[in-house]
Image (cartoon, rainbow, N blue to C red):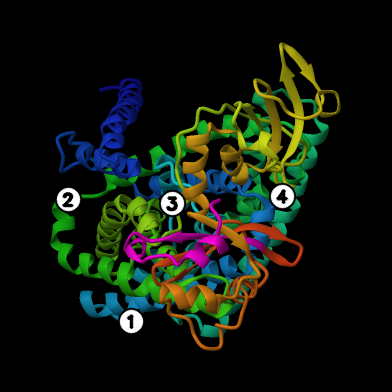
Amino acid sequence: MTTIEHIYWVFAAAAALVLVGIASSLVARRFSAPLLLVFLVIGMLAGTDGPGGIAFDDYSGAYQLGSLALAIILFDGGLRTRMESVRRVLAPTLLLATLGVLLSAILTGIAASWLLDLEPVLGFLVGAVLASTDAAAVLFLLRAGGLRLRERVGATLEIESSANDPAAILLTMMLVEYVTTPAGLSPLALAREFVVQFGIGGIAGVIGGGAIARGLNHLQLGHALSALFALAAAVLVFGITGQIGGSGFLAVYIAGLLVASHVRGGLTNLLGTLDAATWLCQIAMFLVLGLLASPRMLLQSLLPALGIAAFLMFIGRPLAVIACLAPLRRYGKREIAFISWIGLRGAVGIFLASIPMLAQLPHAQLVFNVAFVVVLASLLVQGWTLGFAARVFDVALPHRESTVRRVELDLPGSLERELVGYPVAADARVLAGTQMPDWSQLTLIVRSGEILTPDQGGTLRAGDYAYLLAPPGRVYRLDWLFAPPEEAREAERELFGEFSFDADVHLADIAEFYGLPVRPRDAPLTLAEHFAQRFEHTIEIGDHVRLGAVTLIARELGDEGVRKVGLKVDRLGKVLARPRWLERLLPRA
């Protein structure tokens, strides 16, 4: 086969693998299987031990491809992360992305040293390779599964999974350097290297992100060229930062954050174009990493690798998350439990496992095989149970199929609003005097074929079409105001429970008649005070407190905190009789 023919064969084989993966995704969706796992398995089947028989062992090429793909994925992740969400969960995500990664690496390293009979340094290297959650896996599975998590939990998972990759990459590379350097590196030198890499990466990200945003704002580029400009500039920031000794991965993520918050227009089109590039990067990474794996060799270390996977899922990750989040007192036990469980490992772990292979470290093949098995186990167990876990730990918002068309506006600065259109039914709550939330804004009314401003249209009427601006994460909370009565009541019950009452009711009054477990010091508190004590200054609509068979839900917020509270009685609690005076106290919502 000539060189030209070989190139054609490589192109055809690569395209065929992608097409097979896409076709297989249709079957995977039917069984709710993690789609990225499909591409990983297809890569394995096409490899040297599979039916495809493709001999591929180019770890250097895989590392270069993986570095480029990760840079693009992280830049895209930064673009899709709202700065408002970052500010709200900045402290916990920084802890998870740094201290959490370090704790996971240490704990998993201890387990790996014992299970694999390795020296402590090599055990910690295994821990570092597996320390970070995978942004591609977490973000995709959340979106593909149609899950809407509570805002604080969702923002924490998305930002942590994007921000902890640089820490894991840096920790892995420093440990590899420690093993390969004859004299070794002192702990002080490792700490200094960590600070330097993060410092240079952060500064480069700020400068690079500002420059990219400025270019997008001032250069007269079309939609396609704008996306190419942003993509090329991000890769340039990544390359220069790495060349001068900083963390290029941290730099491109920060650059994406700044571009999203400072670009004045065209962000929707930019994200739409980059979406295809990011998908291609994810698919390429999983296929190539699957080609590198040898099922025959994976079986040799299968049992200890599964032991490490179980330790990481049930002990290592939960302990690290508890150590980072419990002291902050913002997160409930169920939220911490869910964040602990959704610590998916993905392509990043396998990508990092190729670094010891490139450095030709002792037991490098073992490290790679173990990482591959752990990633497979994580995608199978944690990926497949993501939706189930969200329901068990009660962090998922109600999912309702809506017939409402939502049009996403490209507003200056960032995607902070969506335009939502509702037909106004004759019996809609909004016509009965229920006011719309302060965070929504009526922008226009369509009445009898005419387009009217709110001033021209006045009060909404049955048969109108109302169009409102609202934050994307809160749009679903408007549905019950415009839905037909039966559907509205069902939506309201799902969101806020069976009853609604003022938050100045005392906790002791409800606890007495429902037999709820309330501490004596909490009994004199009003429900508003109880929520304020539980959530401090981070209360959101939909936050809830479980008390035995009852769940209390923050329904309306005022300047001083919770103003209205919903009450949902669990199935077991519904067998309890409700006294008449309590029925009067808790009128139907």
Kind of residue sitting beneath label 1: Pro
Between circles 3 and 2, the one closer to the viewer is: 3
423, 245: nearer the viewer: 423
Residue bearing mark 3: 138
Residue placed under numbered mark 4 in the picture: 258
Image point (22%, 74%), residue name:
116
Q: Work out how far the residue at label 2 is from the one at label 4, CA to CA, in angstroms.
A: 43 Å
Tell which of 393 and 586 is nearer to you.
Answer: 586
Vertically, is 241 above or below 466? below
For the residue pair 122 and 43, the one nearer the viewer reads as 43
Instruction: Tell me: 206 left or right of 360.
Output: right
Which image quarter: residue 367? bottom left
Answer with left or right where residue 193 lies relative to residue 336. Answer: right
**Residue type of the residue flagged with mark 4:** Leu
Which label sits in the foreground, 1 or 4? 4
User: How far from the left and from the top, in percent, is residue 250?
Assistant: 60, 58
* Mark 1 or mark 4: whose residue is earlier in sequence: 1
Count neighbours of disc 4 (C-alpha within 10 A) and say few if under 14, some if 14 to 19, many if 20 or more: many
Residue 120's disc number? 1
Amino acid bearing label 3: Val
What numbered label is drawn on residue 295?
Answer: 2
What segment is highlighted magenta in the picture?
A: 563-589
Check disc 1 and report its element: helix, strand or loop: helix
Residues at marks 2 and 4 touching, judged by CB atoms closer than 8 Å: no
Whole-number angstrom distance, CA of label 2 to CA of label 1: 27 Å
Mark 3 or mark 4: which comes first in sequence?
A: 3
